[in-house]
Image (tube, helix red, strand yellow):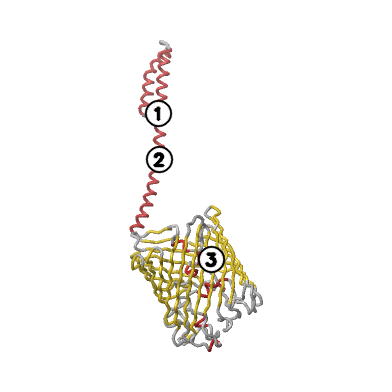
């Protein structure tokens, strides 16, 4: 078009040249018609020049857009190449809204990675304990990293959890499990995990109502045990757990035992030893010949996922669960604990509906002492504990909520305190706890504050709860606790 415009200019010069020449030479003057013709031709030329400029600008803009599109295409292709290389490598990674994960292309291998951090402040006050009556300070109560998934086949599963000891910052194995789904409703597993006994213990520490589990739970829990187990779901509403294991706390770091059967009658020098040597997690270092545990849970209403905590979220439909468990343990033959046997039982129920939640549980333990002389003439014990708690979750908007709660506990040691060397001299204890949860992202980010008040002397301290042992007849211990939790 530029060439056309230049040609028009030349033509105009050719046409008008003679006219101007005649005028300059004194020839026939230029008439108005001539001027009008020249103006028309100039206007036409100006229009063509403007068209040329517009065409050139449009061409420049199109080239600019083309360069931008090419750059965008290169970026998309580079991203596609990266994704293709990951697929070719047989792996994917990301966050599924709950956990970080690693997996191969067809999903036959999977690893979920999760973690928990609990930072806590505790202030405990007691009277005339013979030690510091006011203990205060901060502690990282829990710091855990867990890995779980399946190998080669979704039915072949594993779970390993590492926990940092709050007193030493040493990381130890907190859970080691291998499992296999025999059928859609039967799973077998082996390793170290919580014994299927107390509902409160089986509920994850990150989903508790108060800052910490109850005093009753800490006295009667099996905690971590070693063994093999099976989970059977005969119907959609029933779950049955069975386990053959090495006994109470056999999966704990350094080994463990029942303080009221295998240790209570001995002084500090002999409590931690047996004829075979120090109590350990190894097969020849525990205090048990064998133990059997079974638990049944029944879903009367609601969804099984609602049983994973003690909170009813706003708008949550009604749920009702009942459960019970039994544990029988035979002490180590020919050891320093005189083969003391025991059995324990528990029943519990929980309710959730539109923000309201409630939980009640009872637990008992019967000991079978082989040598009563060492206990000053005491025979067997029948101990009992009970817990009841209630809460109401109030939605405050933006995914946040506040949940006040109250808990009551009762424990009867059945003369196990007054007839042994345990301090305190009181066989019955009543404990109340009140506080609130402030949820920022449900259990993933929450602040909990509560006050624990022991109406009676506590013969056995539980520092993980912020409760310490009391002197004889000195009641009224108070623990103030605040905690912030993050899950990832």
User: Decide: marks 1, 3 in contact (CB < 8 A)?
Assistant: no
Question: 198 left or right of 236?
Answer: right
> Image height check: is 59 above or below 467?
above
Which x, y percent locates residue 341?
47, 82
Label 1 sits on a secondary structure element that is helix
Question: 171 left or right of 461?
Answer: left
Numbered label attached to residue 65: 2
How far apart in space, not on screen, are marks 1 and 3 (Cα)? Answer: 73 Å
Badge 2 or badge 1: first in the primary sequence: 1
**Residue tagged 3:** 118
Which x, y percent locates residue 166?
53, 71
How far apart in space, not on screen, are marks 3 and 2 (Cα)? Answer: 54 Å
Which x, y percent locates residue 242?
40, 73
Residue plotted at (62% across, 74% down): 456
> Image height check: is 395 above or below 140?
above
Which x, y percent locates residue 353?
50, 58
> Image height check: is 458 above or below 444?
below
Q: Nearer the viewer, residue 253 or 450?
A: 450
Label 3 sits on a secondary structure element that is strand
Numbered label attached to residue 51: 1
From the image, state whether disc 3 or disc 2 is nearer to you. 3
**Which corner quadrant of the image does residue 283 belong to?**
bottom left
């Amino acid at each position: 078009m530029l060439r056309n415009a230049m040609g028009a200019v030349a033509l105009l010069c050719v046409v008008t040249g003679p006219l101007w020449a005649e005028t300059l030479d004194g020839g026939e003057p230029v008439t108005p018609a001539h001027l009008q013709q020249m103006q028309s031709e100039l206007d036409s030329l100006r229009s063509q020049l403007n068209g040329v400029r517009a065409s050139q600008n449009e061409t420049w803009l199109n080239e600019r857009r083309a360069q931008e599109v090419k750059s965008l295409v290169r970026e998309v292709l580079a991203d596609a190449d990266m994704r293709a290389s990951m697929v070719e490598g047989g792996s994917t990674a990301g966050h599924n809204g709950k956990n970080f994960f690693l997996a191969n292309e067809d999903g036959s291998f999977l690893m979920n990675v999760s973690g928990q951090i609990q930072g806590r402040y505790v202030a405990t006050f007691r009277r005339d304990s013979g030690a510091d009556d006011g203990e205060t300070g901060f502690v990282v109560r829990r710091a855990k990293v867990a890995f779980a998934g399946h190998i080669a086949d979704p039915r072949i599963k594993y779970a390993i959890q590492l926990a940092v000891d709050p007193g030493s910052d040493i990381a130890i194995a907190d859970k080691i499990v291998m499992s296999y789904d025999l059928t859609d409703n039967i799973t077998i597993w082996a390793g170290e995990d919580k014994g299927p006994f107390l509902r409160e213990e089986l509920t994850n520490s990150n989903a508790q109502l108060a800052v910490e589990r109850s005093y009753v739970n800490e006295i009667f829990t099996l905690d971590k045990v070693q063994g093999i187990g099976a989970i059977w779901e005969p119907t959609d509403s029933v779950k049955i757990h069975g386990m053959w294991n090495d006994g109470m706390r056999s999966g704990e770091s350094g080994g463990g035992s029942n303080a009221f059967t295998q240790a209570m009658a001995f002084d500090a020098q002999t409590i931690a030893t047996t004829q075979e040597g120090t109590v350990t997690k190894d097969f020849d270092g525990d205090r048990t010949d064998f133990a059997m545990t079974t638990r049944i849970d029944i879903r009367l209403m609601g969804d099984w996922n609602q049983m994973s905590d003690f909170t009813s979220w706003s708008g949550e439909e009604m749920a009702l669960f009942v459960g019970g468990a039994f544990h029988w343990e035979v002490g180590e033959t020919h050891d320093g604990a005189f083969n003391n046997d025991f059995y324990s039982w528990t029943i519990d129920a929980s309710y959730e509906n539109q923000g309201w939640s409630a939980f009640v549980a009872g637990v008992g333990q019967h000991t079978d002492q082989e040598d009563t002389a060492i206990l000053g003439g005491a025979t067997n014990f029948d101990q009992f504990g009970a817990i009841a708690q209630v809460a109401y979750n109030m939605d405050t908007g933006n995914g946040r909520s506040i949940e006040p709660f109250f808990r009551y506990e009762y424990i009867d040691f059945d003369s196990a305190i007054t007839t042994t060397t345990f301090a305190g001299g009181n066989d019955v204890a009543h404990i109340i706890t009140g506080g609130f949860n402030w949820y920022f992202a449900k259990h993933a980010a929450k602040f909990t504050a509560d006050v624990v008040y022991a109406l009676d002397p506590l013969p056995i301290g539980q520092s993980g709860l912020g409760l310490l042992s009391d002197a004889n007849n000195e009641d009224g211990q108070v623990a103030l606790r605040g905690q912030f939790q993050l899950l990832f």
